[in-house]
Amino acid sequence: MTLPDPWDAAAAGYRWQEPLERRSLGTMLAVLAPREDEVVLDLGSGVGHVPRLLGRGAGSRTVALERSPRMLAAGSFAGALPLRADVTSLPLPDGSVDVVTAAWVLHVLDEAQRALAVAEVARVLRPGGRLGVVVPGVPRTRAQVLLRSVARAAATARGLGAFAVPHELPALLTDHGLQVRHHSRTGGGYLADVVVCTRAADVTQRSAGPGAATTPGPQP
């Protein structure tokens, strides 16, 4: 028996979050600046917030990857190709993607899952490719702490994942040859940290997922 994905229940009303995510997503995409000829992979695409903001249209080289079938069914992906898969096991060849976006997804994974996801990103990105990440910012005011506590309690009650600030993320990115070149904080909606990285050209691939190719990555 296949158990239902807990995110399926969130699909119907998920679009109401788009205005709260828009500033952080817009900042990430402005820094990434994907070209029309580049392959873009959006991880945890949900109902398509990133593809719609990207606005590349029909025939674009954008893949909207999402685990929840109801999210995919409820979504609108602005010409991107919807693909049902898990972020910890990407069904794509090594070095096949120019830009990866991981917006509002890494924080719902536990630490082990996050490590697998980052390893998979490093595997599928071409040398010199870019990764954009949006995660919750560390709350600094009493109101921010209260709102974050409420959000975490609601996520936990619905089985939606860890919903925690991934403090180990900078070291994890560096360990996989993803060099941070932009880090900013946005408000005007959800409090967020926006990080953009470039994949080094001399990283040995470390993926253990079934999507991984058997050919080793570039060697130093």
Image (cartoon, rainbow, N blue to C red):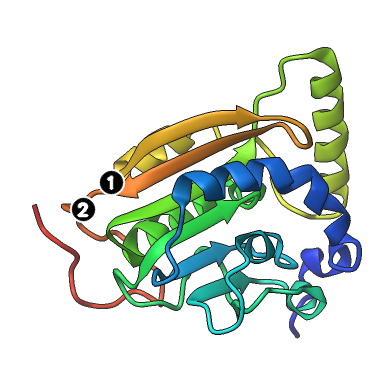
Residue located at (34% from left, 77% from top): 93
Residue located at (38% from left, 42% from top): 173
Residue 89 versus residue 40: which sits nearer the camera? Answer: 40
Residue 187 in the image: x percent, y percent?
72, 30
Q: Is residue 57 above or below residue 144?
A: below
Q: Is residue 206 above or below residue 195?
A: below
Query: Which disc number belongs to residue 177?
Result: 1
- In which quadrant of the rendered view does residue 28 lie? top right
Query: Spatial distance from mark 2 to mark 1, Cα to Cα?
Result: 6 Å
User: Dot 2: what SS?
Assistant: loop
Please state which amino acid type lies under the numbered disc 2: Val
Q: Is residue 194 above or below residue 17?
A: above
- In which quadrant of the rendered view does residue 218 lie? bottom left
Residue 76 in the image: x percent, y percent?
75, 74
**Residues marked 2 and 1 touching at CB (< 8 Å):** yes
Residue located at (78% from left, 64% from top): 7
Please state which amino acid type lies under the numbered disc 1: Gly
Q: Which residue is mark 2?
A: 203
User: Dot 1: what SS?
Assistant: loop
Residue 102 versus residue 76: which sits nearer the camera? Answer: 76
Image quarter (top left, top right, bottom left or bottom right) of the N terminus: bottom right
Q: Is residue 57 above or below residue 14?
A: below
Looking at the image, can residue 62 be seen? yes
